[in-house]
């Protein structure tokens, strides 16, 4: 059996006669080539070993890189925080009129004490970044301690300069009862009145007559709702019969700050403020303090 192939083109014409063994060999060759082609197309890509090591990092290396980046970001944040603390400290020192050579925020303060540095360093000597982060943490803590000290110092100066008692504890109203013996409004008997009263309207603001620290803010028998302010150097002021309070114990108040709303709580016949001044825990006549000029 033979196979004859006939080709006709525009300018070419030929015929080829193949015997049975020859055309079977040709068909078999085509089948082998087609099979190899399909196998190559379906087989997944093979990545050379040298490319694997470049593109696919071990998980431990990736985790280490991420930790380095996180520590670097944290160090940058703390360095920025230290710069802000230094700037704030310099401004507070300038406002408190403290010479910079006596309170330098940028310089590390002298320290002493038992030698514990070796133990700390051995704990954090795993990497330079961790050691740097520890140093910055200690630096930030020192800066915050300096700021707390500076704040207390500046606050003390401020209170001392404004704790001078003067003026009335109200903005509107009138002095309705003086210091001294008077007829008790409830029983009509002569009674010592150890303060002065300022009448006004309910919910009028009550003001501190000097800077200080609130030492009492609550209800007390006879006084009703009472605010007491310690002004230092043995002086205190009391503001009684309030409807409500705007401050609490421990608050630092400034001269002229609203501390309560006027009311008629306790032994009271109407909205007013009972105002007392105490020197060494004894009531004194507040009249001269009410009318004296503010300190300049």
Image (cartoon, rainbow, N blue to C red):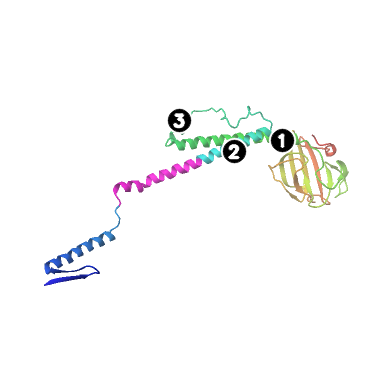
Residue 61 counted in the magenta span = yes
- Check disc 3 and report its element: helix, strand or loop: helix
Of the numbered discs in the image, which one, if any, rests on residue 84?
A: 2
Residue 210, x across and y down, in percent: 76, 39
Q: Residue furthest front?
A: 11
259 over 127 or under it: above or below:
below
Residue at 21 percent across and 62 percent down: it is 33
Of the numbered discs in the image, which one, if any, rests on residue 93?
A: none
Residue at 32 percent across and 48 percent down: it is 51
Look at discs 3 and 1 and give the one toward the viewer. 1
At label 2, counting other C-alpha atoms closer than 10 Å, the crowd grade (few under 14, some 14-19, many 20 or more) is: few
Q: Say which label, 2 or 1, has the lower sequence index.
A: 2
Instruction: Read off the residue under disc 3.
Output: 118
Q: Could you tell me how far apart the alpha carbons at marks 2 and 1 are, in whole angstroms?
A: 24 Å
Residue 290, x across and y down, in percent: 83, 39
- Give the left or right position of residue 32, taking residue 184 as reference: left
């Amino acid at each position: 059996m033979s196979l004859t192939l006939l080709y006709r083109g525009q300018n070419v014409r030929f015929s080829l006669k193949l015997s049975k063994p020859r055309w079977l060999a040709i068909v078999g060759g085509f089948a082998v080539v087609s099979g190899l082609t399909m196998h190559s197309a379906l087989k997944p890509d093979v990545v050379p070993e040298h490319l694997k090591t470049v593109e696919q990092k071990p998980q431990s290396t990736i985790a280490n890189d991420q930790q380095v980046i996180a520590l670097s970001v944290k160090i940058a944040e703390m360095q920025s925080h230290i710069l802000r603390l230094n700037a704030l400290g310099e401004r507070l020192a300038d406002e408190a009129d403290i010479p910079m050579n006596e309170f330098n925020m940028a310089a590390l303060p002298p320290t002493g004490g038992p030698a514990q540095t070796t133990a700390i360093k051995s704990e954090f000597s795993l990497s330079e970044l961790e050691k740097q982060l520890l140093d910055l943490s200690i630096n930030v803590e020192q800066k915050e301690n300096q700021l707390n000290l500076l704040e207390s110092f500046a606050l003390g100066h401020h209170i001392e300069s404004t704790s001078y008692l003067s003026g009335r504890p109200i903005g509107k109203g009138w002095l309705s009862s003086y210091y001294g013996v008077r007829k008790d409004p409830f029983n009509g008997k002569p009674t010592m009145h150890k303060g002065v009263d300022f009448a006004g309207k309910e919910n009028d603001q009550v003001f501190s007559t000097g800077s200080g620290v609130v030492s009492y803010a609550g209800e007390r028998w006879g006084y009703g709702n009472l605010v007491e302010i310690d002004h230092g150097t043995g002086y205190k002021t009391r503001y009684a019969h309030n409807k409500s309070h705007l401050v609490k114990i421990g608050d630092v108040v400034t001269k002229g700050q609203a501390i309560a709303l006027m009311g008629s709580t306790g032994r009271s016949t109407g909205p007013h403020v009972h105002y007392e001044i105490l020197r060494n825990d004894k009531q004194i006549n507040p009249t001269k303090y009410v009318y004296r000029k503010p300190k300049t």
